[in-house]
Amino acid sequence: GQNIDQPTEMTATEGAIVQINCTYQTSGFNGLFWYQQHAGEAPTFLSYNVLDGLEEKGRFSSFLSRSKGYSYLLLKELQMKDSASYLCAVVDSNYQLIWGAGTKLIIKP
Amino acid sequence: DGGITQSPKYLFRKEGQNVTLSCEQNLNHDAMYWYRQDPGQGLRLIYYSQIVNDFQKGDIAEGYSVSREKKESFPLTVTSAQKNPTAFYLCATGQGDTGELFFGEGSRLTVL
């Protein structure tokens, strides 16, 4: 079966750095997405990785290792508004998105 | 503004009633999707459509129905056959090589 694992919840301090991990086992791989979702709202796109390595976009970076079936989202200089759920999703061999359950990130002052 | 509009945002229904959730887009995207989101679970695909007048079942299609008569519209009907319909429903559109999805604001359905 297909499986994506993320921690259920993480807590971090305002101004700090946090890394949210995602491991996957899917039938094929055609890319990995990270989305941010505030409570009761729609997910919004953060990043897309299809090749190994680090993609940096402002305070957010995303890393992919296809051989390890592993990705992480790195958030720097945390702000209170970063409190949200972060969803990892993999594009499988049929170009369908397989979603993780999401990681709820709590930012404390 | 370009975007995806879902309505209603909140909906209450009695058991045994069918309800229809609306999803309209003006992004000119070919593909449209309906997902269900429950606490502690990933998004689960209900139905999707790659082109007008064609749609496919997703992983949890039982108790749901859709239509795609226009490119802009992809309504979802939650029928009385759906045993546990209380959930947050998300409509999305997609276009392009990467498979990136764009989401509506969601509709929260509560069965009383």
Image (cartoon, grey):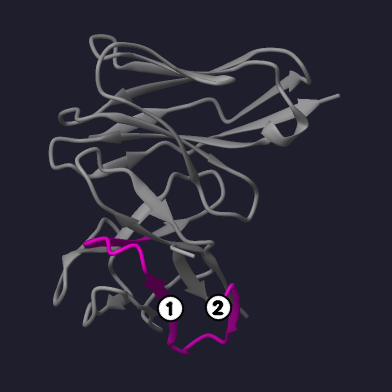
Indicate left or right for A63 with A11 as reference. Answer: left
Q: Is residue B44 above or below residue A75?
A: below
Going from N to C along the chain, the mark reached first, 2 or 1, is 2
Question: Mark 2: which amino acid?
Answer: Pro
Residue type, label 1: Ser
Magenta segment, which residues? B8-34
Q: Chain of mark 2?
A: B
Marker count (numbered): 2
Q: Position of residue B77 (x, y in %)?
A: 37, 80
Q: Are marks 2 and 1 on the same chain?
A: yes
Q: Position of residue B56 (x, y in %)?
A: 17, 65
Q: CA distance from mark 2 to mark 1?
A: 7 Å
Look at the numbered disc 1 and give the secondary structure of its residue. strand
- Picture residue at 63% right of the left edge, 15% below the top: A76
- Examine the structure image and report whether residue B12 is included in the region drawn in magenta: yes
Left or right of residue A50, residue A38 in this image: right
Residue marked by disc 2: B8
Residue at left offset 31%, top offset 40%: A98
Q: Quadrant of the C terminus of chain B?
A: bottom right
Are the residues tagged 2 and 1 within 8 Å (C-beta)? yes
Which x, y percent locates residue A74? Answer: 54, 16
Q: How busy is the neighbourhood of tag 2: few (under 14 within 10 Å), some, or many (20 plus)?
A: some
Disc marking residue B22: 1
Residue name at image x 25 percent, y 14 percent: A66
Camera-side residue of B75 and A3: B75
Front residue of this view, candidates A23 and B97:
B97
Chain for disc number 1: B
